[in-house]
Amino acid sequence: MFTLKIKMNLEPLSKLRRAWISGLSGGSGAMRDALEKASGIYMQSMYERFNRYSSGGGDWTPLKPSTISRKGHDAILIDTYTLRNALDPRSMVSSGLVSAGRSGYRIGIQDGIPHPRSKLSVSQLASVHQQGLGRVPARAIIVEPSWTTKHKMAKAMEVGLKQVLRETVE
């Protein structure tokens, strides 16, 4: 009988794990950059979708004639542009990578940003429109990304992961 001992250096895997967790938990580096890039890709797609749908190019319930008369236009969910602008990834003040933790990350509209004409925050107002409430019909603002958007997000994450792998092997 004989004994076979295999010695492995697991430090690169440990470094990879630390880089991944650091990126998810708000640290800096390639993983965090990739998360921010992926969230920007998603928010850009939601911004473009919002613009299409607010112009009547989607399945949102059209405005009532009385609402059009009061507002002076027929654009859906466009009054102060605050909600639409919260989806603009270039602002990144109120949208994008909202939180990250060990199990993943959330993308959306950050809470606590005041709406200029409402007692609700922008995210609370978005939630009302997302789900519908009382006389307000549901108009989905944040939805599952298209296959194309998912693919672009995955590519951004792949680039970040490859960079992290290069950094951990060095």
Image: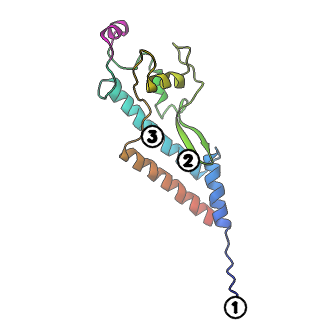
Colour mode?
A: rainbow
Task: Report, in whole angstroms, how far the alpha carbon at label 1 lies from the one at label 2.
Answer: 49 Å
Residue 2 disc label? 1
Q: Which amino acid does label 2 sit on?
A: Asp
Residue 82 disc label? none
Along the polypeptide, which appears first: circle 3 or circle 2? 2
**Local crowd size for mark 1, using a 10 Å CA cut-off: few (<14), some (14–19), many (≥20):** few
Residue 67 within the magenta-colored segment of the rendering: yes
Would you name the residue on which mark 2 appears?
33
Task: Report, in whole angstroms, how far the alpha carbon at label 1 lies from the one at label 3.
Answer: 56 Å
Q: Which amino acid does label 3 sit on?
A: Tyr
Along the polypeptide, which appears first: circle 1 or circle 2? 1
The magenta stretch is 63-73
Secondary structure at numbered mark 2: helix
Q: Which amino acid does label 1 sit on?
A: Phe
Which one is in front, 9 or 165?
9
Residue 42 disc label? 3
Where is 22 relative to 54, above or below?
A: below
**Local crowd size for mark 2, using a 10 Å CA cut-off: few (<14), some (14–19), many (≥20):** some
Which one is in front, 123 or 73?
123
How far across and how far down the image is residue 6, in percent? 67, 80
How far across and how far down the image is residue 43, in percent? 46, 36
Q: What residue is rendered at 55% in x and 58% in y?
A: 163
59 to the left or right of 5: left
User: Taking the image as drawn, is residue 84 in sight?
Assistant: no
Q: What residue is rendered at 32% in x and 15% in y?
A: 74
Where is 157 relative to 100, above or below?
A: below
